[in-house]
Image (tube, rainbow, N blue to C red):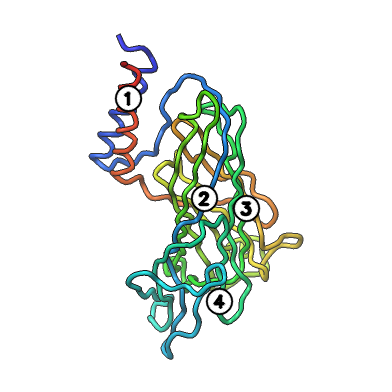
C-alpha cells in the first residue's frame, strides 16, 4: 500500500498531466516532501525587454527610449500599439536582450525625463524549512516617466522585463535548495481619464504598477502599485518596495508582501497556467514519485 507521501506525489502527477492535457485553470501546488532545512545564496538578473520603446503620432516618431542609459534597439521585427480609439498616436514596440545581467533596469526618454526604475535585491537564506514561506528578495519600483499609457486601461501597452532567479544551496541538502526560476515583471503605465487628484481613490487610480508572472506561481500575484510624483497623498513618495515571497518544494513563487513607502497592493488578474506549465507540474510529480519508489 502506498504511504501518505507517495499518495500525495501520485496526486500531483495525475493533476499535472490531466490538467496540462486539458489546459485546466489551476495553480501549482508544491509536492509533499519530508521536513528539510537548508541554507544558500540567491542571485537575480533581468534578461530581456519587450514593449514600447518609442512614441509616435501623425507627424511621425517624436521620442525614443533608453534602457539603462543606452538607446533601445529592437533585435527583431517591431510593431505598433495605438493609445487612442481614433488611432492617431501610440507606441512602437519591440524586444531586445538586456546586456550585463543587471539587477536593476532604468527606463527613460531620450529627450530627458524622470527615469522609471525597477530593481531587485536578492536575500540569502539560512536554515530555511521546506514548505514554509520566506522572503527571497525585494523589488523596489520608482514610478517615473515611461511609455505605455493609453486613453483607457484597455489601451495601455505594458512593458515586459524577463528575469532569471537562482538559488544555490550549501551543505547536505544543496541539491534540493539549488533551483532556477524564470519569469516576467510586467510594468503598466496608467493615465485614467478624467484624472481625479482630489481623492485618495483618484490618486490610487493614477498609480502605475508592476505584476509578476512565472510557470511556478502558487496563486495570483497582487499588483504592486506606486504613486506618481505629481499625484500622491501627503507624506507618500513615488518610490516603493515590496517583498517577493517564495516556498521551497522544488521552489515556487508565492506572493508580494509588506509594501512600503509610496507602494500598495491591489488585486491583479493573472492568466491561467498554460498547458505547458501544468505538464511540467505533472512531470515533476512523476520524477518525485519514481524517486520515492526506488
Q: Is residue 93 above or below residue 111?
A: above
Going from the N terminus, do you reach mark 4 or mark 3 first?
4
The residue where tag 1 is placed is 11
Circles 4 and 2: CB atoms closer than 8 Å: no
Identify the element where label 1 is drawn: helix
Identify the element where label 4 is drawn: strand
Going from the N terminus, do you reach mark 1 or mark 3 first?
1
Q: At which x and y percent is residue 116?
A: 59, 66
Question: Which mark is in front, 1 or 2?
Answer: 1
- Looking at the rendering, in which quadrant would you find the N terminus? top left
Q: Label 3 crowding class (10 Å Cα cut-off): few <14, some 14-19, many 20+?
A: many
User: Tag on residue 267?
Assistant: 2
Question: Which mark is in front, 1 or 3?
Answer: 1
Q: At which x and y percent is residue 185?
A: 48, 55
User: Tag on residue 109?
Assistant: 4
Q: Is residue 41 above or below residue 132?
A: below
Q: Does residue 192 appear anywhere in the picture? A: no
Q: Give the residue displayed 61% in from the left and 61% down from the top.
A: 204
Viewer-side residue, 231 vs 62: 62
Q: CA distance from mark 4 to mark 3?
A: 26 Å
Viewer-side residue, 195 vs 55: 55
Viewer-side residue, 45 vs 250: 45
Circles 4 and 1: CB atoms closer than 8 Å: no
**Is residue 170 found left or right of 88 in the rendered image?**
right
Q: Label 2 crowding class (10 Å Cα cut-off): few <14, some 14-19, many 20+?
A: few
Q: CA distance from mark 1 to mark 2?
A: 30 Å
User: Tag on residue 130?
Assistant: none
Question: Which mark is in front, 4 or 3?
Answer: 4
Q: CA distance from mark 4 to mark 2?
A: 30 Å
Q: CA distance from mark 2 to mark 3?
A: 10 Å
Amino acid at each position: 500500500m502506498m504511504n501518505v507521501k507517495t499518495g500525495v506525489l501520485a496526486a500531483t502527477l495525475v493533476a499535472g498531466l490531466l490538467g496540462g492535457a486539458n489546459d485546466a485553470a489551476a495553480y501549482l501546488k508544491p509536492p509533499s516532501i519530508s521536513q528539510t532545512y537548508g541554507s544558500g545564496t540567491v542571485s537575480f538578473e533581468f534578461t530581456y525587454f519587450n514593449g514600447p520603446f518609442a512614441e509616435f503620432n501623425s507627424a511621425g516618431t517624436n521620442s525614443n527610449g533608453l534602457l539603462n542609459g543606452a538607446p533601445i534597439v529592437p533585435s527583431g521585427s517591431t510593431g505598433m500599439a495605438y493609445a487612442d480609439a481614433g488611432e492617431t498616436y501610440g507606441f512602437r514596440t519591440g524586444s531586445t536582450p538586456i546586456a550585463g545581467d543587471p539587477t536593476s533596469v532604468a527606463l527613460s526618454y531620450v529627450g530627458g525625463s524622470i527615469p522609471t526604475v525597477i530593481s531587485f535585491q536578492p536575500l540569502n537564506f539560512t536554515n530555511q524549512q521546506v514548505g514554509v514561506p520566506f522572503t527571497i528578495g525585494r523589488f523596489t519600483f520608482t514610478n517615473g516617466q515611461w511609455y505605455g499609457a493609453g486613453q483607457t486601461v484597455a489601451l495601455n501597452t505594458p512593458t515586459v522585463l524577463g528575469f532569471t532567479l537562482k538559488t544555490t544551496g550549501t551543505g547536505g541538502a544543496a541539491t534540493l535548495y539549488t533551483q532556477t526560476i524564470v519569469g516576467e515583471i510586467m510594468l503598466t503605465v496608467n493615465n485614467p481619464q478624467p484624472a481625479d487628484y482630489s481623492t485618495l481613490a483618484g490618486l490610487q487610480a493614477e498609480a502605475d504598477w508592476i505584476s509578476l508572472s512565472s510557470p511556478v506561481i502558487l496563486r495570483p500575484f497582487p499588483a504592486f502599485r506606486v504613486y506618481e510624483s505629481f499625484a500622491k497623498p501627503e507624506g507618500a513618495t513615488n518610490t516603493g518596495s515590496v517583498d517577493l515571497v517564495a516556498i521551497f518544494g522544488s521552489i515556487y513563487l508565492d506572493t508580494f508582501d509588506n509594501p512600503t513607502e509610496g507602494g500598495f497592493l491591489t488585486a491583479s488578474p493573472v492568466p491561467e497556467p498554460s498547458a505547458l506549465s501544468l505538464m511540467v507540474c505533472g512531470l515533476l510529480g512523476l520524477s518525485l514519485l519514481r524517486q520515492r519508489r526506488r
